Amino acid sequence: MTSSARRPTPLTTKLAEQIRHEGPISVADYMRTCLHDRDHGYYRKQRAIGRDGDFVTAPEISQVFGELIGLWCAVVWQQMGSPPSIRLVELGPGRGTLMRDALKAARAVPDFCRALRVHLVESNALLIEQQRATLKNETVPIAWAVDLDTKAAGDRPAIVIANEFLDTIPVTQWVFHDAHWRIRRVGLDTAGLLSFTHGNPDPNAPLPPGIPAEPQEGDIFETRCGALVDWAGKLAALGAPLAALVIDYGHLQSAIGDTLQAIRAHRYEDPLAEPGEADLTAHVDFAEFGAEMARYGFCLDGPVTQAAFLGSLGIVERASRLMAANPDKAAAIEGAVARLMAAGGMGSRFKAVGVRGKGLPPLPGFEAVDIGRAGN
């Protein structure tokens, strides 16, 4: 979308006024404002997920996705020694679809279900309404919060699920201009429209190891370093034992590239086009994520591709059983699973990584583990 095709939004006016008075803002601040502004932020007011929203996530494509994660959680609980009480935390639970399917599958392990206390971390009031409706018939205790509750952690173990959550954490972008790295910013051009610009040289730019020694003019790299430190600290404060499953799209090694993107009505658009009306995300740098988790003493399993992760959990076998039980829906079930596993698509673009305390063994899906044992 070109600048001439932009449609001003209430947040456009608010941002322009701020920039006129205070100067250009960082890309991270721009992204944070677009997503979380109290009055006009995307996550404050949009029903983002689903065919009628702006994008579709894996749990909305196939119920098998959430079912496998539910059984994954049951196996992890068993690895923890089957404690009598455990918190199951989901970050950014969407419409509640993943948790609904996960709890459905978890019923195969009654003791696990009795131990569960579900915590959903969500800031979107409209999505909370949908989550309550989706989960209204569940019998396990469910609580909602806008952030991780670390104060009441105590010694209760926790399992954390974060599917397509890290990509929404704002990124700081650095641009190489006139032989120096500078923070990339959002300012106003001569016509008063939002535009990308850059700040003063910064000799202390936190260069990832994958950045070339001799960058080219205009090169961009991204980092979530500060934000990841914050989340790693919150996870560490949850208590022990702790395990987390992170599934998101991104790259395995730090590299040059601008991955900031806006999506609305299942189409990509200029991230500066209509602030507050489109979802803004950026690819996850899994090397950076792993380094920050390791600094807090966590062990990392993976990353592996989503296809490899789901395949090791038995997605093909589970889908086959579902197709046999629902022959009239077999083609749709097969097509949905194929979409999750597609090489060159979701199967390879999305990665899975396990995060665990040092006292836990490697997590399911990152080695040969038969999650069918969860029901025995």
Image (cartoon, helix red, strand yellow):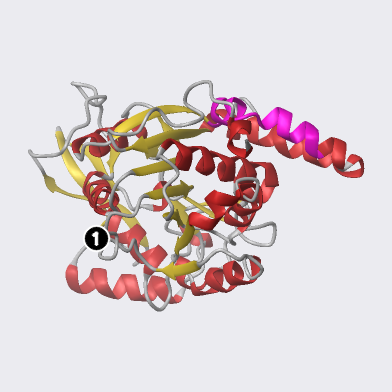
Residue beneath the point at 83% across and 37% down: 323
Give x and y (percent) for residue 204.
8, 39
Residue beneath the point at 61% across and 40% down: 68
Give x and y (percent) for residue 25.
24, 60
Amino acid of disc 1: Ile
Give x and y (percent) for residue 227.
26, 51
Above/below status of 93 relative to 159: below
Residue that sits furthest to the right in the current view: 328
Residue beneath the point at 42% across and 58% down: 272
Relative placement, left or right, of 360 versus 44 is: left
Q: Is residue 154 magenta?
A: no
Above/below status of 190 relative to 10: above
Relative placement, left or right, of 161 versus 322 is: left
| Magenta residue span | 306-322
Give x and y (percent) for residue 176.
22, 36
Viewer-nearest residue: 281 or 148: 148
Q: Is residue 313 magenta?
A: yes
Q: Is residue 262 visible?
A: yes
Count of all numbered marks drawn on residues in the image: 1
Q: Residues within 10 Å of mark 1 (few under 14, many from 20)?
A: many
SS at mark 1 in the image: strand
Q: Is residue 186 visible?
A: no
Residue at image mark 1: 25
Looking at the rendered image, the quarter that the C terminus falls into is top right
Secondary structure mostly seen in the magenta stretch: helix
